[in-house]
Image: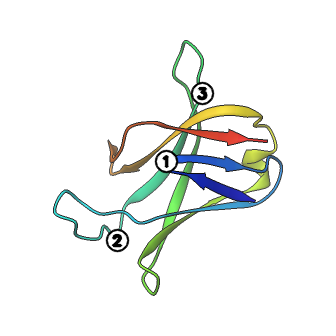
Amino acid sequence: MVEYLYDAIRCSAGTYNMVNAYITDENEQLITEGCYFVIHSTGLVDEIVARIEGKYDSELGVWEFHIGPEISNELRGRYMYCIMKDDTSLCFKQPIYFM
């Protein structure tokens, strides 16, 4: 299960989750390659918990990020996420919750 509240995301821990994102550049042109989803810890030291490669769905015009149970099984509580392209963040870090 995935729920969205503005930029915050809530997922079921230990299950398969798919996060979708409509990604554009500063000129509102669709970005169709090179994007990935990063989950960060929320502790004093910023650690990357997971990096999930994205898949662009050209029919829908959205990116799909598949968070499998092998990743979400170990996650509980609040983390932060951002979407990256070629090692450049496309957004500020936002909260993602695993319940």
Q: Compared with residue 60, is residue 27 higher up or lower down, i.e. above or below?
A: above
Q: Nearer the viewer, residue 6 or 12?
A: 6
Q: Amino acid at mark 2?
A: Thr
Direction front: furthest residue: 5
* Label annotation for residue 80: none
Q: Which residue is mark 2?
A: 32
Q: Amino acid at mark 1?
A: Asp
Q: How far across and how far down the image is residue 15, in percent?
A: 81, 55
Q: Amino acid at mark 3?
A: Ser
Q: CA distance from mark 2 to mark 3?
A: 27 Å
Q: CA distance from mark 1 to mark 2?
A: 21 Å
Q: Compared with residue 44, is residue 97 higher up or lower down, i.e. above or below?
A: below
Q: Secondary structure at mark 2?
A: loop
Q: Nearer the viewer, residue 42 or 47?
A: 42
Q: Which residue is mark 3?
A: 41
Q: Secondary structure at mark 3?
A: loop
Q: Is disc 3 surrounded by few (<14), some (14 to 19) or many (20+) residues within 10 Å?
A: some
Q: Residue at x 49, y 48 (%)?
A: 7
**Between discs 1 and 3, the one toward the N terminus:** 1
Q: Residue at x 36, y 63 (%)?
A: 23
Q: Which residue is mark 1?
A: 7
If the image is split into quadrants, where does the N terminus sit?
bottom right
Q: Is residue 23 left or right of residue 46?
A: left
